[in-house]
Amino acid sequence: MKFNEGMLREGALKDKNILVTGGGTGLGRSMGEYFLQLGANLVITSRKIDVLQETAKEMMEKNGGKVIPVACDVRDIDQVEAMWEKAKSELGQIHVVLNNAAGNFISPTERLSTNAFNTVLDIVLKGTSQVTLTAGKDWIAHKQAGTFLNIVTTYAWTGSGYVVPSAAAKAGVLALTRSLAVEWAKYGIRSNAIAPGPFPTEGAWSRLLPGDLLKKFDPAKKVPVGRVGEHQELANIAAYLVSDFSAYVNGEVITIDGGEWLKGAGEFNNLDQIPQEMWDMMEVSRGKKP
Ligand code: HXC
Ligand code: NAP
């Protein structure tokens, strides 16, 4: 067995209908593709219908199953409600919602226009809450169980300079996840989150590390295990959290970052840079025989 192989047994998501926002690209696409391999049917949604259609076609050619592309800007409640109705008319009951769509860019906060700040808040926090409310109200009204999985990031709890609207919005999504995990459990609705560290995707890396920044700030160097994540590793956790195997997991956020955020947090973690010879000298200077 290798860490980057599929983890769950065949058919683990059989007969589950799963909605993936931002499902045409990047991590949403990778998680969705693994769900499909495990027997689920998918609705993938985002703004760009041409991208969604191409992804759906490629996914079905490779894996079989059903992938329904539906255009929707999650910032617009009318589009969200129309997308939800379309998803149900295509697949019937939707069992799982993966809130993955996001927008982000790097900038000193004082350089952001009000509209720029609001754009990220609107996609990440308002978009997630609108999809969540639309699905949750429908599940409750029809006495159907359901599962939410929300993609946040580790700076949802640490905060981070230069991505402030994203940090504020992801913190909100984390609070939404934990709050509804308690409030809606009585309806058979579970809510969990995953906080990924760096995973290479065109969407995130071209915006967050544009041009030479990727060379100057190699993300792998900040990760104690010495590498960035592979998409299958994330897809494995996501598949577990949307499957019935995780029926007793509710309100949890699973971090998958190779130890990255803790490395930044621990007071003395930068002592990694001290060579062994210097530790030897320090031992001698406090009296230890060489
Ligand atoms: C500053 C910017 C900007 C930038 C746009 N704006 N890009 N400001 N720096 N790089 C400003 C615009 O000038 C405008 O303000 C406002 O933001 C809205 O811009 P639009 O282009 O009209 O917005 P829109 O077309 O809706 O696009 C949204 C977007 C875009 C967020 C700007 O990047 C996008 O579509 N992103 C989706 C994909 C994405 O970001 N993926 C990365 C997720 S990674 P004014 O005032 O001029 O009108 C992630 C976590 C990574 O979330 C964690 C890594 C460890
Ligand atoms: P990505 O490929 O850019 O994914 C973002 C997706 O969101 C795109 O498919 C985009 O599609 C969709 N989207 C953006 N605005 C939207 C809107 N208004 N309405 C509907 N959909 C919208 O980047 P990614 O790296 O895979 O990111 C996926 C998730 O992982 C995000 O939640 C991100 O915050 C999180 N994350 C990523 C990393 C990483 O290292 N990659 C780390 C931590 C967390 P359209 O453009 O077609 O709308």
Image: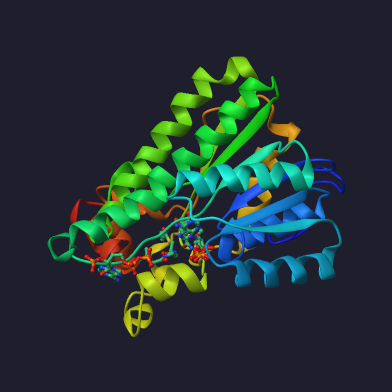
**Left or right: 161 as drawn, with respect to 90:** left
Which residue is at the front of the view, 173 or 220?
173
- Identify the residue at the far top of this view: 186
Residue 217 in view, yes or no: yes
Residue 239 in view, yes or no: no
At 59% from the left and 34% from the top, the residue drawn is 135
At 83% from the left and 70% from the top, the residue drawn is 61
**Left or right: 92 as drawn, with respect to 100:** right
- On the rendering, which quadrant does ligand 1 occupy? bottom left
Q: Quadrant of the N terminus?
A: bottom right
At 40% from the left and 60% from the top, the residue drawn is 103
- Identify the residue at the far left of this view: 110
Task: Locate residue 251, reporting x and y percent.
Answer: 52, 28
Which residue is at the front of the view, 142 or 164?
142
At 57% from the left and 40% from the top, the residue drawn is 149
Task: Locate residue 216, reporting x and y percent.
Answer: 32, 80
Task: Locate residue 35, reporting x and y percent.
Answer: 74, 51
Q: Quadrant of the C terminus?
A: bottom left
Q: How is the image coloured?
A: rainbow
Task: Locate residue 229, reporting x and y percent.
Answer: 55, 62
Q: Quadrant of residue 58?
A: bottom right
- Identify the residue at the far bottom of this view: 212
